[in-house]
Image (spheres, helix red, strand yellow):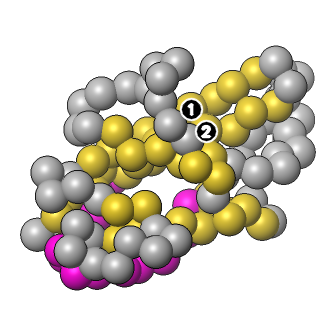
Amino acid sequence: MAFTLSRIDRLYRDYDVTATLRDGGPATIDGADVALLARGTTPTSATTWTAATYAAGVATILLAGPDADPTGALVIPAAGADLWIRVTDTAEVDAEKVERIYVA
């Protein structure tokens, strides 16, 4: 999945976040974290995560282009980035790339 943002855009994006337990039943998720990574890379122990607004299975994130007001937003670098979402449930951590973001 890919999305293009202009250099001055500030846009909210919603992402469905669901998880299942080992037995296949639905997991209760209390929140989700997001990270922007260089395109084609994956999270490491040094990745900086930011809490997303989360309600009823949807994570909402305010994205900003590199020339937009950065207040309260994840600023996409001019080179673009991959957006990852992480859900943590006790001992388990599940991180998934959800979208590649380009800047036009």
User: Residue 1 location, x and y as percent?
Assistant: 33, 52
User: Residue 26 location, x and y as percent?
Assistant: 86, 41
Q: Residue at x 88, y 35 (%)?
A: 25
Q: Is residue 45 left or right of 6 when viewed as pictured?
A: right
- Circle 2 crowding by C-alpha within 10 Å: few under 14, some 14–19, many from 20: many
Write down the quadrant of residue 101 in the picture.
Answer: bottom left
Residue 12 part of the magenta segment: yes
Element type at marker 1?
A: strand
Q: Residue at x 86, y 39 (%)?
A: 27
Q: Is residue 22 above or below residue 85?
A: above
Nearest to the observer: residue 18 or residue 83 = 83
Q: Which residue is mark 2?
A: 86
Q: Residue at x 47, y 44 (%)?
A: 35
Q: Which residue is mark 1?
A: 95
User: Residue 11 location, x and y as percent?
Assistant: 41, 79
Q: Is residue 12 above or below residue 27?
A: below
Residue 85 part of the magenta segment: no
- Residues drawn in magenta: 1-15
Q: Are marks 1 and 2 in contact (CB under 8 Å)?
A: yes
